[in-house]
Image (spheres, coloured by chain):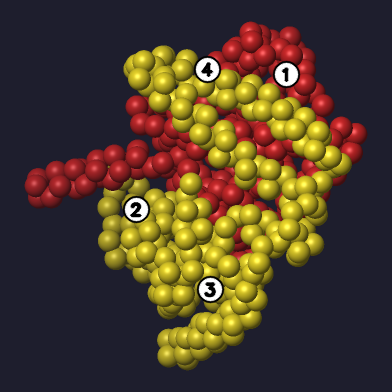
Chain colours: A yellow, B red
Amino acid sequence: MGTDRCAYLSRLRNVDPIPKVWFTLAVLLICVFADSVVVGLFTLAALSVLNIVVGGQRTGDLLHFLKVPLAFLIIGCLTIAIRPIGQAEALWAFRLLGRWRWGITAENLRLGLLVFCKAMGAVSAMYFLSLNTPMTDLTMALERLHVPKLFVELMELIYRFIFLLAGEAGRIKVAQESRLGYRGFRRSMHSMGELLSTVFVRSLHRGNRVFSALESRGYTGSLTTLPGQYTPGRWLYGLAAATAACQLLILIAERRLLP
Amino acid sequence: MMKRSVCKRISLLAAVLALLTIPANAMHIAEGYLPVPWAFGWMAVCVPFVVAGFLSIKKKVALNPRAKVLLAMCGAFAFVLSALKIPSVTGSCSHPTGVGLGAILFGPAATVVLGLIVLLFQALLLAHGGLTTLGANVFSMAIVGPFVSYGLYVLLKKTGCKPALAVFAAAAMGDLATYVTTSIQLGVVYGNFLEYLSIFALTQIPLAIAEGILTVVVFNVLEKYAKEELRDLSVL
């Protein structure tokens, strides 16, 4: 599901997740704080290269995931760039329904472009974490970072159950579709409603069964597992420092050159 | 001159048609889209709700250890629900938010915490939403939507209106409240609130109606076949 398969195939799979978390947060926050087109583009390029070279991701996979947020970003950034402008000077303008003057001003175009580049940089930074860290490692890392235990356990259980329920929902959907259950709006609604309620009832049953199974094996309220065997990965801190330094240098250079 | 205006009309039509294909998961604000002060501001707004929800869950789990496993199942159900495609009135398919269903079944306190976890998973596993925008997304989808849904449901049930109508109204209004909140969150930053509102209205109003109908169907089936299981849920 999603980034999960890539995370298990990643070359960084056995590296301690905590340095990966700090690396991602550092690069991500600098990219968002910098508020600059060039830093955004640099982060996008640098993190994509790191994902491919260091993480061993396939280029096709990475491009596929980079396309996911595009739907939101293109719409979101077009609405920033194109908007009602009144009498302001515009690069391009038209009259909506013959009355309201809409268009692109230089200022809005710059803002739309900035948001787009910044967001793409930030997304690629987030992918460094999610494409190289399996979720189970991440939840264990959260526990080591003193996130409340109940919260972490809920995350672990939910993560496991997602796959159970998604498999079940998928099988029911295939069965319904093969019996023409999604022909027309009314019938689709009915089939979908039955699917959801069945999955829901079954998930409650399954929850009860899981609890009984746990209890019969001596469950006293918390699931403790051994941490994985990680390589320490301290070199990631160095990489983080280097990437952050590049980002900051680019930011300073940009501020100097383009007042 | 004539030709140009025809061209313009065609391009406008094309633009409107392109907007109709926005997937509904576009309601998740993407990573890096919000400026820093707003991103952290929304996180701060969410903190009291999340803490209150967490404490209430903790109390229930201490009373009944079975509740933890049930809650986790409910969270996974919410994730799977939002990954399914539902048929929409306009013919295109979109993803339900599950805001109304979750709030009515599990109550708003549990929904806040489960919503936070589900949104975190959606950001990391599916790249819907993001880490810095998690606060804004939690506020619109796990706080405002569920509270509106739950409040409306309880209110309508008290006034003695038909259960089906109460469920429909709660689910549809929860969806709309989520979409208005997201539009406000985007609008206050970039100063074009009405534009976001009208663009999202294209996908979200049909979706809200579809989700309302769907939630009613789900509740009818549950009432018929799963009365006992629903009673089980009252431990949550």
Position in image of residue B29 (x %, y %): 53, 52
Check disc 1 and report the residue beneath it.
Answer: B230
The local secondary structure at tag 4 comes to helix
Q: Are marks 1 and 3 on the same chain?
A: no
- Chain where mark 3 sits: A
Residue plotted at (55% across, 55% down): B124
Q: Are marks 1 and 4 on the same chain?
A: no
* A133 displayed left or right of A87: right
Label drawn at residue B165: none
The local secondary structure at tag 3 comes to helix
Give the Cα separation between the discs numbered 2 and 3. 31 Å
Give the Cα separation between the discs numbered 4 and 2. 46 Å
Check disc 4 and report the residue beneath it.
Answer: A194
Check disc 3 and report the residue beneath it.
Answer: A31
Mark 2 burial class by Cα count in 10 Å: few <14, some 14-19, many 20+: some
Report the front residue among A132 and B8. A132
Q: Identify the residue at the far front of this view.
A: A217
Front tag of 2 and 3: 3
Position in image of residue B213 (x %, y %): 52, 19
Rendering quarter of residue A57: bottom left
Check disc 2 and report the residue beneath it.
Answer: A102
Q: Are marks 2 and 1 on the same chain?
A: no
Instruction: Using the image, determine if residue B165 lies above or below residue A74.
Output: above
Disc 4 and disc 3 in contact, CB within 8 angstroms = no
Disc nearer the start of the sequence (4/2): 2
* A163 displayed left or right of B42: left
* B159 displayed left or right of B93: right
Position in image of residue A236 (x %, y %): 58, 79
- Chain where mark 4 sits: A
